[in-house]
Image (cartoon, coloured by chain):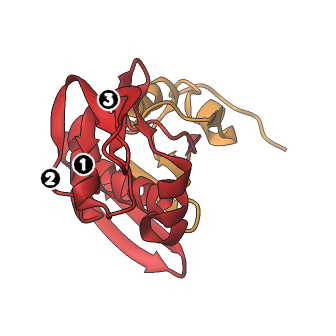
Amino acid sequence: MPEIEIEINTDTGEMETEIKGVAGPSCEKTAEAIKQTFGRPTRDEKTRDYVRRVTPVGKTVKTG
Amino acid sequence: MSKYMTFTDTEFKDRECLLKALAECGYETVEEGEALSLYGYQGDRRSETAQIVVRRKYIGAASNDLGFRKTDAGYVPVISEYDQRAMMQGKFLTTLRTNYNLKSAEKLARSLRGTLHKERVGSTIKIRIKY
């Protein structure tokens, strides 16, 4: 189940969000909904899983 | 996990969340208009205008009007140096930002038709939205 984790630092008001369990391009849709609500992020980066999760279903991925 | 975003800017994108955050800070009465004049603590009209204004009578005798000017990026606070130091012992903008982020998280959860779980750990509020 996809989820969004949000951490708000009450000392600074700064907030960090992390989108979990959403494959690459679909993640952008959720990110857009977050930006519509919270405004422009000062930092916006993809995690390693962003790339890993967009691997097409059925494709063989060699590891190790 | 797939994406990180950090928000530190002072703009408040969403009007509804800003009004709720102001109410949470104790400022429920605001004026809204196109270019409302702001007044200083002596009743002098300032050159700045704003779209959302908390009048000084609701803030303190020595305070100035507090305004929020609408820009393309959102509402930007128009606040005097004195009030930045004096309001909530200098923590007004941080408290407003925290309240705004909480209200925005609730709005986001509603728009995604998700469930929201919130917990406080020290000075950090952790929110998890499942949708």
The amino acid type, in three-letter code, at marker 2 is Thr
What crowding class fits label 3: few (fewer than 14 Cα within 10 Å), some (14-19), or many (20 or more)?
many
User: Which residue is at 47% across, 56% downward?
Assistant: B83
Q: Earlier in the sequence, mark 1 or mark 3?
A: 3
Label 1 close to label 2 by CB (< 8 Å): yes
What crowding class fits label 2: few (fewer than 14 Cα within 10 Å), some (14-19), or many (20 or more)?
few
User: Which residue is at 39% across, 37% downward?
Assistant: A34
Residue with the mark numbered 3? B50
- The foreground one among B29 and B42 is B42
Which percent across, then down, holds residue B69? 36, 29
Q: Is residue B131 visible?
A: no
Q: From the image, state whether disc 1 or disc 2 is nearer to you.
A: 1
User: Which residue is at 53% across, 27% downward?
Assistant: A58
Q: Do the dots labelled 1 and 3 sit on one chain? A: yes
The amino acid type, in three-letter code, at marker 1 is Arg
Query: In screen coordinates, is B6 left or right of B87?
Result: right
The amino acid type, in three-letter code, at marker 3 is Ala
Which percent across, then down, holds residue A59? 60, 25
Q: Earlier in the sequence, mark 3 or mark 2?
A: 2
Which percent across, then down, holds residue B39? 32, 39
Residue with the mark numbered 2? B29
Residue with the mark numbered 1? B55
Q: Which chain has been coloured orange in this picture?
A: A
Could you tell me which secondary element the residue under label 2 belongs to? loop
